[in-house]
C-alpha cells in the first residue's frame, strides 16, 4: 500500500481510520480529543492528496502527523487522564483480566509521552523497529533501548497500581 | 549492571528483533540467572495483557464529521479550478506572474510621473501635450539647461 500513487482518499481512509483513532485514544486516554485529532489528520490528508502532494509512505505520514498532534495536545493541556476513557473498550475477557487491562492502561497513560508512543506503536499497532524509528525520527538501536526503558517503567508503574506488587 | 544487557535483549526478544547469536547468548544467561527469568516472566505477562486489549474503532459520528468537512472542502475548491486539479496553474507560477505584473505596473506608473517632471529646455512653460509625449533633449538643450541652472544658483 505504501507509496502507491493510485490510492484514493477513500482507500486510505478505510484502511487507517481505526488504527489512527486507536493510536490517538491510547496516547491521550480521551476519545473526544482523539476524534478531533483523527478528523484533523484525514482532512489534511485529503487536502494533500487533492493538491497532488507526493507522500511516499502514507502509513508513516499518517502516524507522524497523529503523533505530533497528540503531543501538541498533551503539551497544551498538561494532560490529565480521564479515567472514564480507559475502561471504554474492555474486549471479551473475564472480570479479572478486564481489571488488569484497565490497570495496565492507566499505567500506560501515566508514562512519559516518549515511552508511551513507542510502546503503543509496538505493542498495539504492531509496527517494526524500522517503522517506529521512521515515525519517531530516530534509529533502530535507539528504539530498541527506548522500548526496553519504556517496558521497565511500565512494569514499575503497573506494579504500583495492581495486584502484582 | 551486567543483567541490563540481557534485560534489554529480553525486551527485544518479545518483539522478535533478536539475532540468532543474541538468542543463544540470552538463553545461556537465563539458564543461570533467576532474576532475569523472573523479569522475563513479568515482561511476558504485561505484553500478553497489552496485546489482548481490543482496538478502538473510529466512532460513526466522527466519521460523519470528517466526511462533511471533506465535502465542504470539495465544494470550496470547485470555484478555484484554475488552482487545483489536473489543469491547475502551479502556485509558484501564479506568484511569479503576480510579482512580474506588479513590477511592470510600478514601472509604468513611475515612468509616467518621471515624464511629468521633465522640464523642456525651451522656456519653463509646460504644455498639456508635453505630459503625454516623450521629449528628446538635444545637446543644445542640455547646455542651455545647465547655463540656466547655474545662473539660478548664482542668484
Image (cartoon, coloured by chain):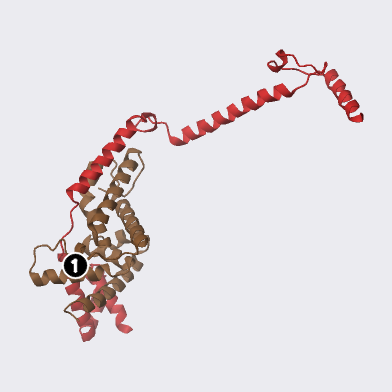
The residue positioned 24% from the left and 62% from the top of the image is A29
Q: Is residue A154 visible?
A: yes
The residue positioned 8% from the left and 66% from the top of the image is A93
Please tell me whether residue B95 is drawn above or below residue B28 in the rendered image. Answer: above
Q: Is residue A2 visible?
A: no
Query: As rendered, which of B148 and B1 lies closer to the eye?
Result: B148
The residue positioned 51% from the left and 34% from the top of the image is B96
Query: As rendered, which of B99 and A83 lies closer to the eye?
Result: A83
The quarter holding residue B146 reads: top right
Query: As rendered, which of A147 and B56 lies closer to the eye?
Result: B56
Judging by colour alone, the chain drawn in brown in this rendered image is A
Q: Quadrant of the C terminus of chain A?
A: bottom left
Residue B56 placement (x, y as % from top left): 18, 57
B66 displayed left or right of B113: left
In terms of secondary structure, where does tag 1 sit? helix
Q: Chain of mark 1?
A: B
Residue A69 placement (x, y as % from top left): 33, 55
Number of residue marks:
1
Please tell me whether residue A147 is drawn above or below residue B102 in the rendered image. Answer: below
Find disc 1 in the rendering and name its residue: B50
Label 1 crowding class (10 Å Cα cut-off): few <14, some 14-19, many 20+? some
Residue B126 placement (x, y as % from top left): 76, 16
Judging by colour alone, the chain drawn in red in this rendered image is B
The residue positioned 8% from the left and 63% from the top of the image is A92
The quarter holding residue A78 reads: bottom left
Query: As rendered, which of A27 and A52 lies closer to the eye?
Result: A27
Residue A21 placement (x, y as % from top left): 23, 54
Please tell me whether residue B87 is drawn above or below residue B123 in the rendered image. Answer: below
Please tell me whether residue B136 is drawn above or below residue A28 in the rendered image. Answer: above
B53 displayed left or right of A72: left
Amino acid at each position: 500500500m505504501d507509496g502507491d500513487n493510485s490510492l484514493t482518499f477513500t482507500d486510505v481512509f478505510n484502511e487507517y481510520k481505526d488504527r489512527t483513532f486507536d493510536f490517538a485514544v491510547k496516547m491521550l486516554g480521551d476519545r473526544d480529543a482523539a476524534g478531533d485529532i483523527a478528523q484533523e489528520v484525514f482532512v489534511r490528508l485529503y487536502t494533500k492528496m487533492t493538491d497532488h502532494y507526493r507522500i511516499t509512505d502514507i502509513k508513516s505520514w499518517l502516524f507522524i502527523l497523529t503523533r505530533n498532534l497528540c503531543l501538541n495536545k498533551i503539551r497544551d493541556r498538561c494532560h490529565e487522564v480521564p479515567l472514564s476513557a480507559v475502561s471504554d473498550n474492555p474486549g471479551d475477557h473475564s472480570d479479572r483480566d478486564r481489571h488488569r487491562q484497565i490497570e495496565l492502561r492507566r499505567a500506560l497513560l501515566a508514562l512519559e509521552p516518549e515511552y508511551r508512543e513507542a510502546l503503543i506503536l509496538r505493542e498495539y499497532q504492531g509496527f517494526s523497529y524500522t517503522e517506529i524509528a521512521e515515525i519517531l525520527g530516530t534509529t533502530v538501536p535507539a528504539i530498541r533501548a527506548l522500548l526496553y526503558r519504556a517496558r521497565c517503567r511500565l512494569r514499575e508503574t503497573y506494579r504500583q497500581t495492581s495486584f502484582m506488587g | 549492571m551486567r543483567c541490563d544487557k540481557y534485560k534489554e535483549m529480553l525486551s527485544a526478544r518479545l518483539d522478535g528483533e533478536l539475532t540468532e547469536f543474541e538468542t543463544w547468548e540470552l538463553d545461556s544467561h537465563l539458564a543461570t540467572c533467576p532474576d532475569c527469568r523472573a523479569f522475563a516472566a513479568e515482561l511476558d505477562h504485561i505484553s500478553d495483557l497489552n496485546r489482548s486489549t481490543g482496538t478502538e474503532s473510529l466512532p460513526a459520528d466522527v466519521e460523519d464529521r470528517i466526511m462533511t468537512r471533506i465535502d465542504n472542502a470539495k465544494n470550496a475548491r470547485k470555484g478555484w479550478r484554475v488552482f487545483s486539479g489536473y489543469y491547475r496553474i502551479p502556485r509558484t507560477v501564479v506568484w511569479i506572474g503576480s510579482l512580474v505584473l506588479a513590477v511592470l505596473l510600478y514601472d509604468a506608473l513611475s515612468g509616467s510621473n518621471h515624464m511629468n517632471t521633465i522640464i523642456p529646455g525651451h522656456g519653463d512653460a509646460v504644455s498639456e501635450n508635453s505630459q503625454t509625449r516623450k521629449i528628446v533633449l538635444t545637446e543644445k538643450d542640455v547646455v542651455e539647461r545647465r547655463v540656466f541652472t547655474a545662473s539660478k544658483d548664482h542668484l
